[in-house]
Amino acid sequence: MDPVVEALLIAFFVALIIAFIATSSLRAELKSVRQATEANIYIKDGSFNLTNEQDIYLCRKVEKTARPKQQS
């Protein structure tokens, strides 16, 4: 095997191992984080009271552009 190719392969695998160790250590710090389907875990009990379920949009901008008609 060519020494240059061998050196590149070794460098690639060393970089791969370093990247794996770095991402594993970062992932280990996120043990308290878990996937949730609802936002209830982010709200303290009694701190949020929804009384009116209505969407109000403050701004509305609609731009219309006429399409050129195709000639047959």
Image (cartoon, grey):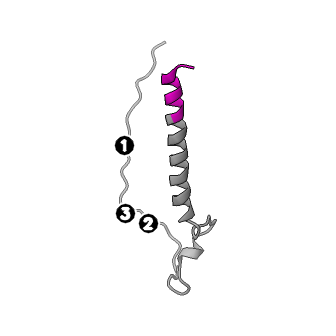
**Residue 17, relative to residue 31: is it above or below?**
above
Residue drawn at the location 38% of the way across and 47% of the way down: 62
The residue lying toward the viewer, choosing from 33 and 7, is: 7
Q: Indicate the amino acid at tag 3.
A: Leu
Residue bearing the label numbered 2: 56
Q: Are marks 3 and 2 in contact (CB under 8 Å)?
A: yes
Per the image, the residue denoted by label 3 is 58
The picture places residue 38, in percent across and down from the top left corner, at: 61, 68
Which residue appears farthest toward the right when viewing the image? 37
- Labelled disc at residue 37: none
Q: Residues within 10 Å of mark 2 (few under 14, many from 20)?
A: few
Taking depth in this image into account, of 22 and 46 the one nearest to the observer is 22
Instruction: Compare marks 2 and 1 and give the one earlier in the sequence.
Output: 2
* Residue 30 highlighted magenta (yes or no): no
Q: Which amino acid type is marked by label 2?
A: Ile
- Residue carrying label 1: 63
Q: Amino acid at mark 1?
A: Glu
Magenta stretch secondary structure, dominant: helix
